[in-house]
Image (cartoon, helix red, strand yellow):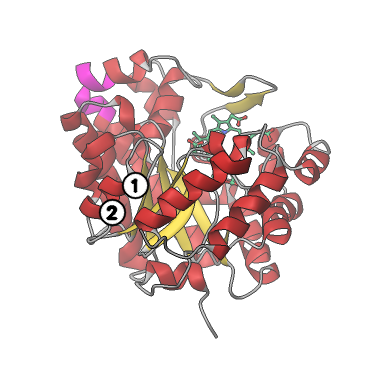
């Protein structure tokens, strides 16, 4: 049976038009998501209810015929599975009982992680069974640095001063937290692959706040350790890295021993990526999510510009960050049509 265009692209096959999926393709911009989300108050409880998680995983695939589904969950299930209190406040985003002292690490433990997260693996098993064979199913996790940001700040932050100062002043103890997160993420991704995820993506959404040397130590190096750890158990599983907003430092993530593809945020020029990255590694990205809100000719021109630079592959069409709630669903349908109908410009 064919593995589908998304997985074949990751293993080097080129198609006349690239496969497409979108980060945060399930979510509040879809009325059918809002309807089922309204049936559960707590967001984490919603993530841990397999029938509901499966349903919202499938919704965007049904509506738009995307080449991949991503399991509906959140990166913050890992701190939850380690025993840190995590909750989501309406309109405010995630909140965590912040780690304020290295002694707080003592309260975190990997011992119960995969038991706590068992509903995620059940959802993956069910989603894989329900999806068409040619539609890939992605598992995912937050990378250690981004998880540490939320765990130390106690939620989102304007400047992430607490996590940076901890890492700069006390690298040894910060290293202990990162080590724990490396092992926890390996456990979580391994369980997702064993439940049926065809590929995985590592989100390092806040990597871009680090200077270069710290970027190497706290973003790249832990992500490489995760990739190697997962590969000792599952040597062939494709791994996509998304180090967001790191600029040209993304060059150091060209690590074929670790990452099958690099996901590019909107700040990376498609032309530059075609020259510096694509000859070495499959790339994914990088339409501005607000182009998808704008729609119309702006969306059409920008989508074709990206396709003309990167579309000959190896390339997976995606956004530079997640779909935002104000996105009109019709614009997603328009985007899929543009990508599937693309032929290279002859200028
Ligand atoms: O469709 C998909 O992509 C799968 C589901 C998914 C969610 N979160 C669902 C979600 C994925 C892959 C994530 C990843 C995630 N979560 C990241 C990394 C990607 C990125 O955006 O940088 C981060 C940083 C988080 C943490 C998080 N979760 C935040 C900051 C928020 C609040 C912001 C918001 O959009 O509300 C969440 C909540 C969240 N995760 C929602 C969804 C659909 C919205 C909550 C709701 O529906 O009630």
Residue 35: image quadrant is top right
In the picture of the structure, the residue carrying the numbered disc 2 is 274
The quarter of the rendering in which ligand 1 is drawn is top right
For the N terminus, which image quadrant? Answer: bottom right
Looking at the picture, does residue 88 appear above or below residue 123? above
Secondary structure under tag 2 reads helix
Which residues make up the magenta segment? 166-174
Place of residue 55 in the rendered image (x, y in percent of width and height, measured from the top left)? 74, 54
Residue 107: % across, % down: 44, 29
Toward the front, the furthest residue is: 347
Q: Residue 322: x and y, percent? A: 54, 39
Is residue 17 in view? yes
Decide if residue 71 is in sight here.
no
Q: Quadrant of residue 268?
A: top left
Please tell me whether residue 172 belongs to the stretch shown in magenta: yes
**53 lies left or right of 243:** right
Q: CA distance from mark 2 to mark 1?
A: 6 Å
CB at mark 1 closer than 8 A to ligand 1?
A: no
State the residue position of label 1: 270
Q: Residue at x 23, y 61 (%)?
A: 279
Nearest the eye: 104 or 223: 223
Q: Is residue 155 shown above or below 258?
A: above
Q: Nearer the viewer, residue 239 or 13?
A: 13
Furthest toward the left, the residue is 213
Q: Residues within 10 Å of mark 1 (few under 14, many from 20)?
A: many
The percent coordinates of residue 125 (x first, y second) are 63, 65
Q: Are marks 2 and 1 in contact (CB under 8 Å)?
A: yes
Decide: is 284 above or below 5: above
Which element carries disc 1, helix, strand or loop? Answer: helix
Residue 216's label in the rendered image is none
Q: For residue 331: magenta?
A: no
């Amino acid at each position: 049976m064919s593995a589908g265009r998304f997985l074949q692209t990751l293993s080097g096959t080129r198609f006349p038009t690239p496969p497409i999926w979108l980060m945060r393709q399930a979510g509040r911009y879809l009325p059918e998501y809002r309807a089922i989300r309204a049936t559960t108050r707590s967001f984490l409880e919603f993530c841990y209810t397999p029938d509901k998680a499966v349903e919202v995983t499938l919704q965007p695939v049904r509506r738009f015929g995307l080449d991949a589904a991503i399991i509906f969950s959140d990166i913050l299930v890992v701190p939850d599975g380690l025993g840190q209190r995590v909750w989501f406040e309406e309109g405010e985003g995630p909140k965590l009982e912040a780690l304020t002292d290295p002694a707080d690490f003592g309260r975190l433990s990997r011992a119960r992680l995969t038991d706590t997260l068992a509903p995620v693996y059940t959802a993956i098993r069910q989603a894989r069974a329900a999806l068409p064979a040619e539609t890939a199913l992605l598992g995912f996790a937050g990378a250690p640095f981004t998880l540490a940001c939320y765990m130390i700040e106690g939620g989102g932050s304007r400047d992430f001063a607490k996590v940076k100062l901890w890492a700069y002043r006390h690298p040894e103890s910060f290293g202990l937290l990162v080590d724990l997160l490396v092992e926890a993420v390996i456990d979580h991704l391994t369980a997702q692959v064993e439940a049926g995820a065809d590929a995985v993506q590592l989100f390092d959404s806040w990597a871009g706040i680090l200077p270069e040397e710290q970027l190497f130590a706290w973003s790249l190096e832990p992500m490489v350790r995760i990739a190697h750890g997962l590969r000792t158990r599952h040597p062939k599983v494709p791994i996509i890295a998304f180090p967001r907003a790191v600029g040209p430092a993304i060059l150091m993530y060209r690590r074929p021993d670790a990452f099958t593809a690099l996901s590019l945020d909107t700040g990376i020029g498609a032309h530059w990526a075609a020259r510096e990255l694509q000859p070495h590694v499959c790339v994914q990205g990088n339409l501005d999510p607000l182009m998808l809100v704008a729609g119309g000719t702006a969306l059409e021109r920008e989508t074709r510009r990206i396709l003309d630079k990167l579309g000959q592959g190896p390339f997976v069409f995606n956004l530079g960050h997640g779909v935002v709630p104000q996105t009109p669903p019709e614009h997603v349908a328009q985007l899929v049509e543009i990508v599937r109908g693309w032929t290279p410009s002859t200028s």
